[in-house]
Image: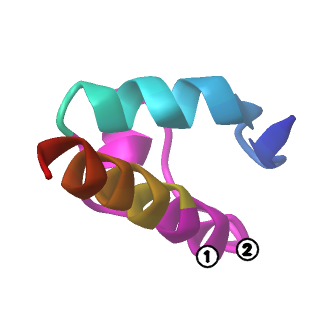
Amino acid sequence: MYVCNCNGIREREVRAAVASGASRPSEIFRACDAKPQCARCVCDMREILQEQQQALRYAAE
């Protein structure tokens, strides 16, 4: 599924960037060698970031 239509960034690329240490949408764009354009995807990126952070919290318990 595409998260960012403007740059063609897919969900798996966002998750890979987060797994590599990205903690903000700007870092995800940098990891994908892209720049925000319309910024509609930023909310989706933040949701993915929160999901990953919660998963790490639960794994640590």
- Left or right? Give the position of 21 relative to 19: left
Image position, residue 41 (x, y; %): 68, 64
Residue 13 seen in render? yes
Residue 61 or 52: which is nearer the viewer? 61
Residue 26 seen in render? no
Which amino acid lies under the numbered mark 1 shown in the image of this protein?
Answer: Cys
Image position, residue 52 (x, y; %): 39, 49
Contact check, label 2 and label 1, Cβ < 8 Å: yes
- Left or right? Give the position of 11 relative to 60: right
Which amino acid lies under the numbered mark 2 shown in the image of this protein?
Answer: Arg
- The N terminus, quarter of image: top right
Find residue 39 and report its image quarter: bottom right
The span shown in magenta is 22-47
Q: Which residue is mark 2?
A: 40
Does residue 1 show up magenta in the picture? no
Q: Residue at x 52, y 36 (%)?
A: 14
Q: Which residue is mark 1?
A: 43
